Image: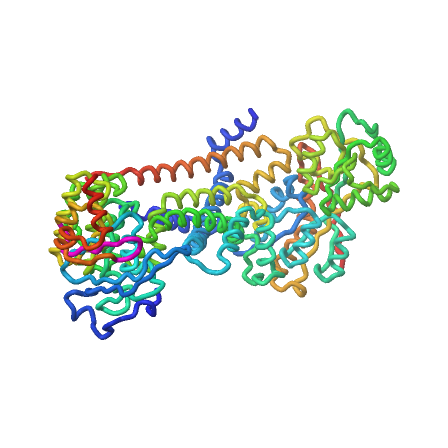
Amino acid sequence: MSDALITPRSRSLAPANRPDGVLPVALDGVRYRADGATLLDQVTFRLRPGRLTTIMGANGAGKTLCLRLIQGLLRPDDGQITYATGPLNEAGRRRIATVFQRPVLLRRSVIGNLRHALRVYGIPRGDRAEMLADLLHLADLTALAHRSARVLSAGEQQRLSIVRALAAEPDLLLLDEPTANLDPYATRLIETLIRAAEARGATVVLVTHDVGQARRLADDVIFLNRGRVLEQSPAQEFFDTPASDAAAAYLAGRLLL
Amino acid sequence: MLARTLMTLMLLFAAVGISGPATAADRFIILQSTTSTENSGLYADLLPRFEADSGIEVRVVAVGTGQALRNAGNGDGDVLIVHARAAEDAFVAAGHGVARHDLMANDFVIVGPASDPAGINGMSDTAAALRKLAQAHAAFVSRGDDSGTHKKEQALWRAAGLEPQADGDWYREAGTGMGATLNIAIGMDAYTLTDRATWISFGNKLDHRVVVEGDAALQNPYGVILVNPETHPGVRARDGQIFIDWLLSPKGQAAISGFRVHGQQLFFPNARRTN
Amino acid sequence: MGDAITEALRLVAFGDAALWEIVSLSLRVSLTAVALACLIGLPLGALLAIARFPGRGVLIVATNALMGLPPVLAGLLVYLLLSRAGPLGPLELLYTPTAMVVAQTVLVTPIVAALSRQVIEDLHQEYDEQLRSMGMRTWGAVMTLLYDARLSLLTVALAGFGRAAAEVGAVMMVGGNINHVTRVMTTTIALETSKGNLAMAVGLGLVLMLIALVVNGAVMGLRSAQAVPRHV
């Protein structure tokens, strides 16, 4: 990952001096193209510490792409993403954790997946046992600790991937439609976990189509349409008085379902 | 807990592999040899006697004479026992060998199917028999591998005034060792030239039998050569010479003539040193 | 064939010392070669699976093609290397079990590299984004992939072992089929065939297949024991 494309705004600030770590994160005029199509254009927004931001928008609006760019998995073709800690290096990338829409779990037991994450995230050996127990408990997976991760239910897998992300003790937790395929009970468990993540100091970005969920959780809403940011506003304001026709239509469409 | 499968297996493999060779004699020599002496069981009878006398292990690499000469010509061997006089002399002349000594002899025979389509059974004039065989276009399998037997066979055809080509008709080239060639000849109901030692000890004769024998032209002398340490540093010349001296000694010669398969003597000692 | 089966049974039942010496050398040579081939081939396969560099496609094709390397050619190359007339002549390795291990390693490494490349590449496609999002560098990712693909890679190693244990051309050429020193199952079978002892040859062949069966059975047992999801 070339640092040149992710220009730092404040190189001098070391993470240790900042309780908010990589935050705030700012996207400034970001453009991303693939196969000749512009998928994101002039995307500018700011993620502030402690505020749960939901990214909403129709399929193909570019929501998941935003997460990948923030995590540093992709580079913008134009524009900048700036992090409070400076250019995103390996250490910085570990301050951010992503839970993908379809959880990618290793072919190991539940506890094996968590052990792997703790090791990768560089958690000191002596702290790992305690964190393991804590994370298993948090996900309510203690009883299934030695079960192969791949035989878990969809909800259990999603819970495991969220606590695995929390093993990084991230500043920023990126969740891509974590409840897309879950029943209401499993959804509620995930939402509880998201609250717990916030309580542990993670700032959460949540991509979701579930307007009810967004109403329950969001502090801020970013609304994307065809690769452009149409709105970035406090949740209440967005839901009560959407500024754009597209957002209004989107919300109405959801209500029609 | 699930861990270590591959690791364990690899360590196991490695541990198994590291343990030393089956026998690790301090003193040994490599003998590049023609196959007839090995396949007939001569070495199995002879070498333990020598090893008991000398404490030197003889490791036999049994390949065709041509291959044995080439290997020894690369310095890969200390002593050579082969049967192709002209090639042996050339080997020594080229500086690869110290000297070539007569060791022993037996004879070649032509074997063929009991039905004897060429009608050569009982003949002792090899040249006449080969001409008859060629006229009848009876199937004949040649070693075709530049071995001592192959060289001998070519010389016999030349002496008969013929130069058969392996064009897929009756004259076939196997391109392989004596035993494999016999298997092919037997499978094809064909004639072939073999040394008598290999033939007598061969286990898959079916109804093949000796049809031509007893010609002076069928003599098969074996020579023994020490690979030249001046040309090929690393050759175990001292122990190699001890082996050669033993073979040529009355004791070694007696051991050769005492070797029997099915009650028959296969090799006839004729030690004669060349200086 | 009846003779051969009787011979095989006799060999196994009475297990004469000569047979066990040959069997154990076969196993030692082939298993060591497979272990070395894994040591070289797995990282190479992982590299080809994950890294993107110019010439990668050519290398993959070459590795795949080398799976068909004729044993005799591998034997000849190693012979030329280890011969006293060759560059490594002074090591005096020709006609030793070590030479046979080297030749079989040359044969098996492309198999391990090519097959593991496929296995790891498939898994890599699945894991890549997750591992990168966790900030893993290439080396760590490779270790994770190797570990998680271990059961498939075990099958890859078995394929390599099959190739090593079954080939005769390479070990014949660089080992010399020396009694008590470099004589293994396959060269013994070739020797007995050339002596016309066909029943003995087929009997030995049956013993060789029995060994392959036992090795494969043991590994499959290990596999299934590992694959069962365990409960607390």
On the question of residue A63 being in view, the answer is: yes
In terms of depth relative to the viewer, which is nearer, C228 or A218?
A218
Rendering coords of residue A49 (x, y %) = 15, 62
Left or right, residue C47 beside residue B177: left
What residue lies at 29% left-to-right and 37% top-to-bottom?
C228
Q: Residue furthest front?
A: A245
Residue A253, image quadrant: top left
- Which residue is more in the foreground, A136 or B32? A136
A228 in magenta: yes
Q: Is residue B19 visible?
A: no
- Quarter of the figure with the N terminus of chain A: bottom left
Residue drawn at x 74%, y 38% as measured from the top left: B194
Say left or right for B245 vs C157. right
- Left or right of C158 on screen, residue A156: left
In this view, A79 is above or below C147: below
**Relative image position of residue A43 (x, y in whole percent):** 28, 61
Q: Position of residue B76 (x, y in %)?
A: 62, 56
Q: Does A21 appear in magenta?
A: no
Q: Which residue is more in the foreground, B143 or A239?
A: A239
Where is residue C115 drawn, in percent x and y? 45, 47
Label the magenta part by its dominant secondary structure. strand
- The magenta stretch spans which residues? A217-229
Q: Where's the C terminus of chain A, which quadrant?
A: top left
